[in-house]
Amino acid sequence: MNKKYAIGIDYGTQSGRAVLVDLSNGAELADHVTPYRHHVIDKELPGLEIKLGADWALQHPADYIEVLETSVPAVMKATGIDPADVIGIGIDFTACTMLPIDEQAVPLCFHEAHKRNPHSWLKLWKHHAAQEEANLINETAAKRGERFLPRYGGKISSEWMIAKVWQILDEAPEMYEAADLFVEATDWVVGQMTGNLVRNSCTAGYKAIWHKQEGYPDNAFFASLDPRLEELTATKLRGEVLPLGTKAGGLTPEFAVKMGLLAGTAVAVGNVDAHAAVPGVGVVEPGKLVMAMGTSICHMLLGTEEKEVEGMCGVVEDGIIPGYYGYEAGQSAVGDIFEWYVEHAVPAYVTEGAREEGISVHEWLERRASRLQVGESGLLALDWWNGNRSVLVDTDLTGVMIGYTLLTKPEEIYRALLEATAFGTRKIVDAFHNSGVHVKELYACGGLPQKNRLLMQIYADVTNREIKVAASKQTPALGAAMFGAVAAGAAQGGYDSIVDAARNMARVQEETFKPIPENVARYEKLFQEYTLLHDYFGRGANDVMKRLKEQKEELVNANNYIS
Ligand SMILES: Nc1ncnc2c1ncn2[C@@H]1O[C@H](COP(=O)(O)OP(=O)(O)O)[C@@H](O)[C@H]1O
Ligand SMILES: O=C(CO)[C@@H](O)[C@@H](O)COP(=O)(O)O
């Protein structure tokens, strides 16, 4: 039999990338990135001059199809591989990134009649304007003693499906009515490729409160939120939920032409970026926490029992690797915080200095920040530039930096921001470990480990754990390709299980980041200070962040379309 290949497509926040992988050893033979033409839509609807409210974040579904039409033919062309030897396709996606569609699976925002209504558009994972609904979901679920709540760390996030759907119903009931289904973007894209719209157990479990044994919460719960939601799960969330690695269908002739592949090629059910990364780094057993480090961080861990962990995003049976409980936690901004600083807050001399040295502003700052000792700057920050998705689960929390003086330097601020995100991760590691879901080693993948060595050393020091880094630069895409190979099956030259695929295809780099004892001790003290600050602003002693945000939102919303 000829060598066989699979294509994994990773849909990130800013771009989509396809990777063509050799199934015998996981070698990535070609990759290609397609930036989203319409970027993240957070100010106004493209070409329509309709302003969006505070905390909105949308995307254009057509951008995702463009990734298939551009990046897949590009990797095929770069390798010259015969399409007949590409036996499987898998995709992974940000989540909960959801959209309303009509009976033909056409996004409502493609309809002339609906496109001017922002609620007809696709809501990106970091759309945070449904916090009010999330608060009510949490209050109601707690009052009713809903069994699902502990499985989500005690709180359902405003980033997730039910809060987003309810926001649509609250603010645009006509869009709620017009929607035949609300679906995750990952399922929609798979549905486009195969003509078969199915839901995957990963997004259903982590983002839509679906449970393998119990299904969705019952109608009475939804009715207690809003009587109009009573039938939600049987109507607009209906559809078969299939386990990861299942074949959703074969590529349609139309998409085969668009993508330069053969009709009928196996397509796996959709998956989430962070979750696909776990087999992508070769983790198929408990004790190894995988950090998918990019604009945000998702922390993924396997366990043999269902435990309650404060603030975790969720525990889902078979949610990552079949046979285990998959735990997810996360920080809603990490790289995004560094980007904010680099783009909006560094003085001109830094940008010019970086240009003169021919390096990026990040690299310029990293070089200088590396020369600082732990604690030397006297700065401490809270990493809540995009809310808190960790133990506090509250998108209304905002950032803090403490310890400025007239002598504070940009590289000191940059380092304090790197450290703040490491402290955020430490909170998550401790929460798991202390709840009996043990964390022995850390595995890192995503863009950040390749970009910033100082960041990785800080994470090793702050968590006092060794960090192994994925050999692949495209770990979620590699993981997605593995699921594509499982969808095809061993008889076609793929694999019968994701564990087999991971054993043959995943690798980590030889070099690891080991904690430096002296730094560990110093960071321990700083972490105690971080915890004081974290609890003061995050657990109700001072709700100043929320009051400021309320004031701001009143003004923004008064001036914009959404009221
Ligand atoms: N040298 C760097 N150090 C730290 N962060 C960086 C550096 N270069 C880029 N970034 C950040 O990396 C993030 C992008 O990460 P990446 O993994 O490529 O994307 P995504 O999360 O969309 O998959 C951006 O938020 C950017 O600010
Ligand atoms: O929330 C999840 C996964 O559950 C992510 O999709 C979301 O944090 C976005 O990830 P990226 O920062 O784009 O890698």
Image: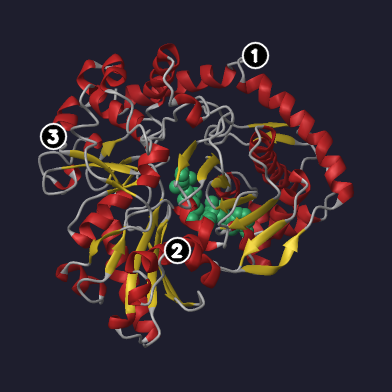
Q: Give whichever of 199, 255 is nearer the camera.
A: 199
User: In this image, 45 relative to 107: left or right?
Assistant: right
Q: State the CA–CA distance, disc 2 to disc 3.
A: 34 Å
Identify the secondary structure beneath mark 2.
helix
Query: Which label sits on residue 477?
Result: 2
Who comes first in sequence, dot 2 or dot 3? 3
Mark 2 or 3: the one toward you: 2
User: In this image, 48 relative to 37: left or right?
Assistant: left
What's the amino acid at mark 3? Ala
Vertical relation: 194 (above or below) 272? below
Image quarter of the C terminus? top left
Identify the secondary structure beneath mark 1.
loop
Identify the secondary structure beneath mark 3.
helix
The residue to which callout 3 is attached is: 178
Q: State the CA–CA distance, disc 1 to disc 3.
A: 43 Å
Q: Which residue shows up at 31% across the image and 70% down it?
A: 70
Where does the image place residue 255, in percent across and percent down from the top left? 20, 68
Label 2: how many Cα within 10 Å (few below 14, some 14–19, many 20+): many
The answer to whether the residues at label 2 and label 1 have Cβ atoms under 8 Å apart is: no
Vertical relation: 441 (above or below) 140? below
Q: Which residue shows up at 40% across the image and 24% down it?
A: 134
Q: Kindly tell me whether residue 352 is visible in this rendering.
A: no
The residue to which callout 1 is attached is: 541
